[in-house]
Image (cartoon, rainbow, N blue to C red):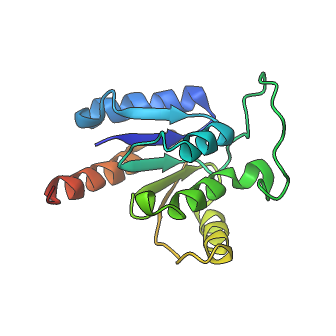
Amino acid sequence: MRCLMVDDKRVFSEMVINRIAKEVPSLKDRIELISTEKVFRDRLQSNDLNFDLVILDVMVHWAEQYEDVVLPDPSLVKGGFFRAGIRCFVELRKRERFAKVPIVIHSAKDRDTVRDELNQALEENGLPREDVRIFEKTGDVKPLLEAIGGYLAIASESPG
């Protein structure tokens, strides 16, 4: 199993990745971190992503602050930084290849707000609502680890 993590808080992300690797050994060295929405979109567009599980933050910068990038068309980044992860979620679901890949949201925003924003974005794009696991970022990553372990158990029971 391979895991993709989209989160721009590198120190926090690396702490989570290290904990996942320690507590879910089958994912050690199998977690890729993408830290900007632009890199995520570029990789998705180039079909250069291969994963079975996604851990997604909601608030992700478009690009690294030190990069000299052209800002995207405003319609592409509706809602700005505060909805970047929601846009990434929708982009994944628009592609058949990732339509059923489990996505776990791990965000500093509260669950109800994230759920409402996600459902609105899915509806705006003609996609069905989903019962997504949403975890608030705190010092305790145990609930996130338990969710990942659950997805691993389901994946190991699946044929093929």
Q: Is residue 8 left or right of residue 153?
A: right
Residue placed farthest to the front in the image?
Answer: 46
Foreground residue, 157 or 49?
49
Q: Quadrant of the N terminus?
A: top left
Residue 124 horizontal/vertical position (percent) = 68, 75
Say above or below: 30 vs 95: above
Residue 121 horizontal/vertical position (percent) = 66, 69
Residue placed farthest to the top in the image?
Answer: 66
Location of residue 25 (image quadrant): top left
Q: Quadrant of the C terminus?
A: bottom left
Residue 128 horizontal/vertical position (percent) = 52, 78
Residue 65 horizontal/vertical position (percent) = 78, 27
Say above or below: 15 vs 104: above
Q: Is residue 57 left or right of residue 73?
A: left
Q: Residue at x 76, y 47 (%)?
A: 81
Foreground residue, 65 or 45?
45
Q: Is residue 17 left or right of residue 79?
A: left
Residue 140 shows in the view: no
Say above or below: 73 vs 64: below
Foreground residue, 69 or 78?
69
Q: Is residue 133 left or right of residue 84?
A: left
Foreground residue, 64 or 44?
44
Location of residue 109 (image quadrant): bottom right
Q: Residue at x 58, y 28 (%)?
A: 10
Q: Residue at x 39, y 58 (%)?
A: 101
Q: Residue at x 77, y 53 (%)?
A: 77
Residue 62 shows in the view: yes
